[in-house]
Amino acid sequence: MMRIIDEKIEGEFDGFKPFTLKCKKGWIAGTFQIKQNRLCISNAICQKCFKELIQFAIIKYKTNKILIYNIMNINNWFMLKGFKRTTMLDPVYNEVVDCLIGVWITQKSVE
């Protein structure tokens, strides 16, 4: 089993909880959006560890609703079955960004 480090991010945040999850092979960063009850993944550098990191976040925040924010840098976004491509207006930079939105389906292992 992969060791995952859950970095605590200090501060007061209105409507969301930021997080960073790391392992030996990579990391993901994002926020848990409280009102929408979903994870927003804004950055990821993973070498075959994205699945384990996202499943850790799903268990921690008790939701499998996911928004992957700004997919411009993700060249294999199409591999996430069931996710739909959408655009959003970034509230800080006032720019339209490409995103993926969907529900992460965790498959049970067959033994």
Image: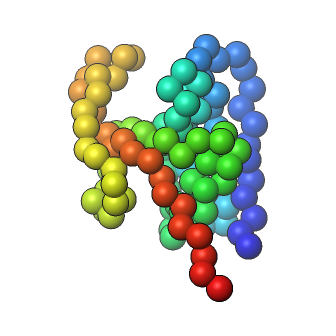
- Left or right: where 64 falls relative to 62: left
Could you tell me how many numbered marks the image carries?
A: 0
The way the protein has been coloured in the rendering is rainbow
**Which residue is located at x 34 percent, y 60 percent?**
81
Q: Is residue 71 visible?
A: no
Considering depth in this image, is 26 or 107 the residue closer to the camera?
107
Question: Which quarter of the figure is the N terminus placed in?
Answer: bottom right
108 above or below 82? below
**Which residue is located at x 37 percent, y 17 percent?**
91
- Expressed as whole percent of the image width and height from the top left, the position of residue 40 reads 49, 37
Question: Which quarter of the figure is the C terminus placed in?
Answer: bottom right
Find residue 109 and report its image quarter: bottom right
45 above or below 86? below
Find residue 27 and report its image quarter: bottom right
Q: Is residue 79 visible?
A: yes
58 above or below 80? above
**Which residue is located at x 75 percent, y 26 percent?**
10
**Which residue is located at x 54 percent, y 21 percent?**
35
- Expressed as whole percent of the image width and height from the top left, the position of residue 5 reads 74, 53
- Expressed as whole percent of the image width and height from the top left, the position of residue 89 reads 29, 22
- Expressed as whole percent of the image width and height from the top left, the position of residue 28 reads 56, 49
